[in-house]
Image (tube, rainbow, N blue to C red):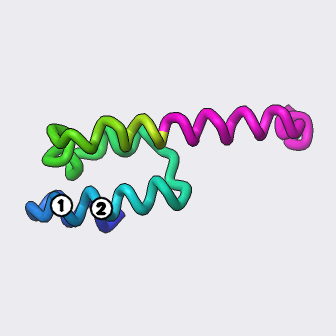
Amino acid sequence: MYAGVQARFGDTARALARLTSAVEGGFTVPEALRGHPWLAPLRDSAAFGPLVERAETARREAEEAFREAGGPSLLGA
């Protein structure tokens, strides 16, 4: 995740923009957003919380669609 490199080296504006693009493009791993140490400089940003919330919402929606489509049975679960 290049946004992590940008955040680590102080380019927080571009890092947030890149993360926003990633989430809008389907990156739905809120645990990574909350836990990656290189993203720490972004966590105080007013935009970061809503970004994590969007990732969480998209993940829930994807999981729900997977279940509704019979995904677990297709995988033999």
Provide the residue span drawn in magenta.
56-77
- Rendering coords of residue 16 (x, y %): 26, 56
58 relative to 11 in the view: left or right? right
- Rendering coords of residue 46 (x, y %): 21, 39
Is the N terminus in the top left, top right, bottom left or bottom right quadrant?
A: bottom left
Q: Determine whether 5 is above or below 58 in the image.
A: below
Residue contact between numbered discs 1 and 2, judged by CB atoms under 8 Å: yes
Count of numbered circles in the view: 2
Q: Label 1 amino acid? A: Ala
**Residue 34 vs residue 65, the one in the foreground:** 65
Q: Label 2 amino acid? A: Ala
Q: Helix or strand or loop: what does disc 1 sit on?
A: helix
- Rendering coords of residue 31 (x, y %): 41, 37
Query: Residue at position x 55%, y 56% from top?
Result: 26
Q: Main secondary structure of the magenta part?
A: helix
Query: Residue at position x 37%, y 56% from top?
Result: 20
72 relative to 11 in the view: left or right? right
**Residue 14 vs residue 28, the one in the foreground:** 14
- The residue at which mark 1 appears reads as 13
Asked if residue 73 is among those painted magenta in the image, a careful observer would answer yes
Splitting the image into 4 quarters, where does residue 77 fall?
A: top right
Splitting the image into 4 quarters, where does residue 32 fall?
A: top left
51 relative to 7 in the view: left or right? right
- Rendering coords of residue 76 (x, y %): 89, 37
Splitting the image into 4 quarters, where does residue 2 fall?
A: bottom left
Would you call the spot at circle 2 few (<14 residues within 10 Å), some (14-19), or many (20 or more)? Answer: few
- The residue at which mark 2 appears reads as 17
In the picture as drawn, the residue positioned furthest to the left comes out as 10
Query: Residue at position x 33%, y 64% from top?
Result: 18
Q: CA distance from mark 1 to mark 2?
A: 6 Å
Q: Helix or strand or loop: what does disc 2 sit on?
A: helix
